[in-house]
Amino acid sequence: MDGMIAQGVIVPVPKDPGGGYTHEQHKRNYRAIYLAGQLYSLTGEREYADYARDLLLGYAALYPTLGEHPAKANQYSGRLFWQVLNDAVWLVYSVQGYEAIRGTLAQQERERIDNQVFRKAAEFLSVGSADTFQRIHNHATWATAGVGMTGYLLGDQNLIDIALLGLDKDGKAGFLRQTELLFSPDGYYAEGPYYQRYALMPFMVFADAIDRNDPQRGIWQHRDGILLKALRTTVHLSYNGYFFPLNDALKDKGLKTDELYHGIAIAYGKTRDPSLLSVAEWQGRTVLSQNGRLVAQDLAAGKAKPFQFPSRLLRDGPDGNDGAVAILRQGSGNSGQVLLTKNSSQGMGHGHFDKLSWQYYDNGHEIVTDYGAARFLNIEAKQGGQYLPENTSWAKQTVAHNTLVVDETSHFGGDVTAADKIAPRQLYFSGTPGAQISSGTMVGAYEGVNFTRTMALLDVTGLAQPLVVDVMRAASRNAHQYDLPLHYDGQIMRVGFKARSNITDRPTLGSSSGYQHIWVDAIGQPGAAKDAFVTWLLDGRFYTYRWIPPSDSEAILGESGANDPLFNLRREPMIIQRTSGASSATFASVLEAHGRYDGASEETSASDSQILDITLFRDGGSDILMIETIGHDRTALAISYDSDPAQEHRASIGGMAIRWRGYAAKVDLPREGSTK
Amino acid sequence: MDGMIAQGVIVPVPKDPGGGYTHEQHKRNYRAIYLAGQLYSLTGEREYADYARDLLLGYAALYPTLGEHPAKANQYSGRLFWQVLNDAVWLVYSVQGYEAIRGTLAQQERERIDNQVFRKAAEFLSVGSADTFQRIHNHATWATAGVGMTGYLLGDQNLIDIALLGLDKDGKAGFLRQTELLFSPDGYYAEGPYYQRYALMPFMVFADAIDRNDPQRGIWQHRDGILLKALRTTVHLSYNGYFFPLNDALKDKGLKTDELYHGIAIAYGKTRDPSLLSVAEWQGRTVLSQNGRLVAQDLAAGKAKPFQFPSRLLRDGPDGNDGAVAILRQGSGNSGQVLLTKNSSQGMGHGHFDKLSWQYYDNGHEIVTDYGAARFLNIEAKQGGQYLPENTSWAKQTVAHNTLVVDETSHFGGDVTAADKIAPRQLYFSGTPGAQISSGTMVGAYEGVNFTRTMALLDVTGLAQPLVVDVMRAASRNAHQYDLPLHYDGQIMRVGFKARSNITDRPTLGSSSGYQHIWVDAIGQPGAAKDAFVTWLLDGRFYTYRWIPPSDSEAILGESGANDPLFNLRREPMIIQRTSGASSATFASVLEAHGRYDGASEETSASDSQILDITLFRDGGSDILMIETIGHDRTALAISYDSDPAQEHRASIGGMAIRWRGYAAKVDLPREGSTK
């Protein structure tokens, strides 16, 4: 702040796109207006109020002169920024700073800033940008928050009403409707955690303002306390401080972001929930506001309690009917295990074609990965920091995810409009410790092909770490090529099968739907699950992915980064199971963490897989995947696909009778040769 | 320890190679004998002494029955381990544990362990393995340390004498001679930091024992205190806690290793140098010994002072005449800058063909990288944890390093014997803050081609970060192809020149000398230094490598990992400057760190290079590289190649007269258009 004050007031005429000089300067300015206001509130030092005033007077001179932004990329141009969204963010920050210092101004200055800056900005963002303002979308949340807070500050009831209820004041648009439609009943935001974080900020800040100005509205209680629920859910959607990178997501985003500093402080101010203090402690900072001061004081007073990261099923959709994201956790939120199954809806324009995909976290790292977005935010050399062409050609495509690709085309043919109409269904969820299970099904992503996937995080006798089990069934009346990719992080230690390697000339796997971005390292035809495995090493721990190869199937070892002349992609390895020519396919796989490598102390243990074999049995409509460890302990995941929890099921596997209750269960089996 | 005691005594018959079960169990055992002994010393708890005794009685039964190890890889077989080196390590640890508990034993047990274990092991490692024992090599240091410490413990003067003076007791071999020949006068060990760490352990431990038993020898003062010097130099050869990965080196090794825990504790016990305490504090642990106890007490008493990481020239060779490693530092030892120039000797069998190579560190990371060794220590799937074939075919080859390759062959034709005979010469070194310089020359690495390289770390007006400057001259009478690779870490943001990209089919660059392991991403022909650059991003900071393209030259963007069917290599990017058909070549390049990317706060600055152009002038025998920033500040590095520090030099660059004194200097120039 002091550095900016020393620099003086710099309010340049808008010119540059994201990342450029004028863009960054206007960002610095709105933060400065906000901070100067808060600092004045907390310290009473007039210097801060004066600086915020001078900046705002600069805007009073500039703002009325502005038309469309010269760097606008589409019809949604801002005034100060290349897109209207940034203008709304500018207003949300600036109005808070202005609120804090407005009382210090001479009447003439106040009127000038009121009328030349805030009324004009509120008008531009509401009636002047009606298309955006009326949407049920996070861009509209920023706009309604900015407009509504301006309304409260200027005592303009019309601005308040249109912000809360939409331009027609009928409640079909506006902030309240957004709280009802943008979050699921479990507080999940359809675009995914990255945008959930971003969207949360105006929700929390505006709700705080509504509560202060209109406490009788009970905004925090609205829809069963959805906003506080959404805040907690956002935290749950993280591992080791970073958000799960579902859909368009940059991986650097996590709990240490401005949005979460504000969100946690406001939520703590409202709830005094001591577990939020431990999140703030982990964040290592809070915001300059009365809520932030309270967080700091209560943390210092030792009031923090641990924030719990339970396993959760997060239903998607306004009514919770559009599929779900399941978070299966074991151990600590920072270094334990997370199996994430994404059976949720497309999530609009930022959604990826990744129905029934999954991710795995362990030992502080993303092990089974999601590429996230292909974008380098604010870096001019990378298309001005916007989404790169590879975001569409690779990152959104199905093959860039850990889920089924039929005939080398993406889900819904890569068509967002079609994708937004049909969500997967979550068939089953169990958070039973040691036998956590999530199952979902997708009908309509491919014409005539349905697929159902059951995944589990199991404690298995004979294995030191939880095991991920994956049974994916795809069915059709016609023959297809079925691909099941697994994207992972680490260096290959051992490939269990013989492969033809492309070691002097490396071809691409295909020509469209993302396949053009895959280099083929090697292709093999493992005959049995004993050999069908790849072991890799990441940060001192070994991982083995093992599968039961369908007959006539191939395994492809590849890497992203082909057809990328501008080096826009990260180069990341993958394994693709492929089977062709059959009308249906079953992919049964396990992911095993094992052993330890410590290069500093030169200690290595269990560097090879601790599983001897896996076998899939089908009996009636049930699937039973049996795991046998090298110590000959045997465990099964039995799936009946019958959602009646009371129903008992029986099956015979290799001459052995087993039984279980409900949709799916872990079954401990006797060791081979022993009698029951 | 308690876990091992609960498991009981397990002394298996030797069978497995490195990483295998019996190998790891005997390693666990020697550590347990050592630790149990120390714990008994510190606590007086008899349980520990008894466990060490029982283990040693197990060895008393086993040891006399052993012959050559079944998994031996060459003639240097051990008894307990696949190589004799590990047997020596076993003895060094075990004899220390035994020393601590020997007084607790009944006479019969003591005699049994004395005679059946220690005398036999000492005999095997000395006269039984004379070839190893008599070498001037770190393997011999372990052997002499083990044998000598056994001598002190058993009161066997013969063992002491042969350990100190060699089997013939003439001082031509043995521990004392090793201290004289294995370290340079600056405490540098020719094999490089990785093996320096390893070699240091027996030096420190045995010296400590000599000092306790034969204080009148003054072992710590021997050769001007070389052992303590070597310990400090080892710490200097690290960045952010990890050793510079010169030669065969695994990158996980650093200050948090057993050798350095022991080394720091012993050195502190001897010197009470408070700066060693801050190293121990950073290590976060110390050893279970009287020295370790002292470290812990004095740390707790607040006696630590910061360990300084100055710029240093470390001469190589017993007399300091075999070239040198220069460490040019700026800022903190953990996150500041290090320019490392490797003008040192080959370093025997673990040496790489990398004369006049360099590395750069910044912001906590290795930016310009050295591959280190191709090896996964103790991982059975990777050739039993031994050096991989790719260590020879890639990691040792010249093209895997940041130095000159002539005609696609490695230095000395890749012949270690030839390489060990001729070292580079260090021509100049200056640690002047803001203008640090190192220059070296190599004659004899290629027949008929000499090359001289001057590198500098300069504070340049107009740049926020220090600039690396590199002027490499290669001269011959015949035409050659000259390649200058740069290996780096990060993702490409911008390539300044047009390149033909291999985006659907990726070929290798060559077929031998490491070239077979390089994938070619793209090839271009930049015409001028304004365009001849590549910018990449690593951990929030941008780096631009810029060079003056020789006429008819190419720039190759590549990646390691071709011809690697077993996925033994890491995949790392590189830039190769190539010029063909001329008898001499000059490569002038700069490496610039700039800007900042913070994805969490969405702040980006200076993502593009802050340099406008670089120009090389030759006047008389001098080279002058001029740097012009985008703000039009101009700075030059002037090199006379004249080692007389008093000599004044003049040159004319672009019509401007400049002068400087000595071998090389930074010269600030007037801005273009201004008069001096």
Image: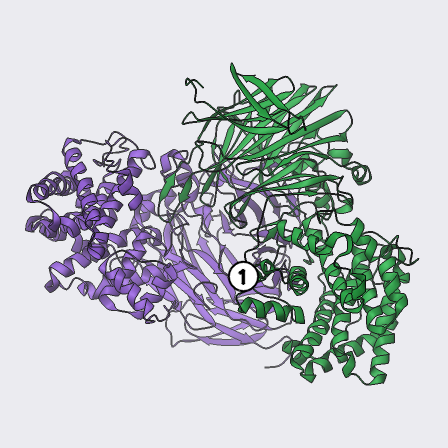
Chain colours: A green, B purple
Which amino acid type corresponds to the residue marked 1 in the rendered image?
Val
**Image quadrant occupied by the N terminus of chain A:** bottom right
> Whole-percent x and y of residue A488?
56, 39
Residue A23 position by quadrant: bottom right
Determine the residue located farthest toward the right in the rendered image: A168
| Residue A217, percent from left and from top | 81, 62
Asked whether, in this view, residue B137 is left or right of residue A406, the answer is left
Label 1, on which residue? B590
- Position of the C terminus of chain A by quadrant: top left
Closer to the camera in the image, A578 or A94 = A94
Asked whether residue B142 is in view, the answer is no
- Residue displayed at 47% across by 58% down: B360
- Judge by depth and name the residue closer to the eye, A452 or A669: A669
Label 1 sits on a secondary structure element that is strand
**Left or right: where B598 falls relative to B355:** right
Quarter of the image where one finds residue A461: top left
Horizontal arrangement in the rendering, residue A259 relative to residue B42 (left or right): right
Subunit ID for the residue under disc 1: B
Which of the pair A548/B322 is nearer the observer?
A548
Q: Vertically, is A487 above or below A477? A: below
